Image: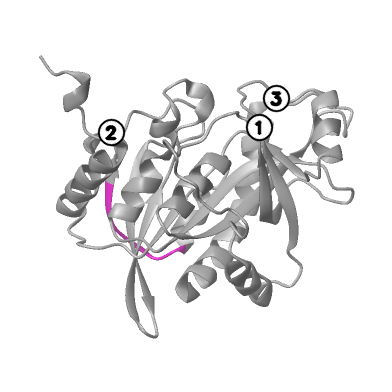
Amino acid sequence: MTHAADAPTPYELADSAASRLAELTGVERHDVALVLGSGWLPAVDALGEATAEIDTTDLPGFSAAAVAGHSGRIRSVRQSTLSGDRHLLVFLSRTHYYEGKGVAAVVHPIRTAAAAGCSAIVLTNGCGGLKEGWRPGQPVLISDHINLTGASPLVGANFVDLTDLYSPRLRGLCKEIDDTLDEGVYVQFPGPHYETPAEVRMAGIMGGHLVGMSTTLEAIAAREAGMEILGISLVTNLAAGLSGEPLNHEEVLEAGKAAASRMGGLLSQVVARV
């Protein structure tokens, strides 16, 4: 019988997952990780040549995807650049905090990516937009966040600076490629229910421009691991109370598909320069 004291730490579990990942993909070290959110799957085909694809459940510490529109798979992609081949680690789904599996499960892919050698990570999501003039299908760079989950992936007296959490350098690269990109502050609610109009107004008063149910805990774990972080939201709907229409998960996914295909080109160029 295994006692709690014998259980691996989250970091040991990530090391085990990274070792198994290397075995299954044949790639000893990955360079950049990407986590694809709701509606972002079409973007992955533009990133490069898929050299391996495995189920998340093939690796220690991962559980099956629980949300429609999310694929419980991990793809290893080879991207050819002028300076040589780079290996991208693409998570085609994420574990959400609202699934009730705990914060460690939410950030396990991030810690696995760090253990696999990734020095940078791109976190994407589908979200509600608050800013006037934004439309469904619009990409927005995340400049900062507000974490309303009441949780943190950090354990103990582990004080991690989040001052410039979302890399100014990587946001600058994105704007060099597409100078029409806007920026905004992402607000994570616990979910899984969508926000009420009053909660959306609260987020705006607090300085938020984007509302969703992911990303902030992952970003904190990535910073703890020393990775450079780029966050990109796809505005899949206007936040509750702004459009006069009810929110619908299927419509959120549909709104993201066409835009995500366009975003693949941006991601491919940005990742090549990370």
Q: What coloring was used for the rendering? A: one colour
Callout 1–callout 2 Cβ contact below 8 Å: no
Residue 215 in view, yes or no: no
Q: Which mark is residue 194?
A: 3
Kindly identify which residue carries mark 2: 61
Q: Which mark is residue 148?
A: 1
The reply, left or right, for residue 23 in relation to residue 213 is left
Give, as a single range, the part of the protein colored magenta: 47-53
- Is residue 24 shown in magenta? no
Q: Is residue 22 above or below residue 241?
A: below
Magenta part, dominant SS: strand
Observer-nearest of 72 and 116: 116
Residue 88 image offset from top left, x and y in percent: 37, 61
Q: Amino acid at mark 2?
A: Gly
Q: Is residue 98 above or below residue 128?
A: above
Q: Is residue 46 above or below residue 86?
A: above
Callout 1–callout 3 Cβ contact below 8 Å: no
Observer-nearest of 69 and 121: 121
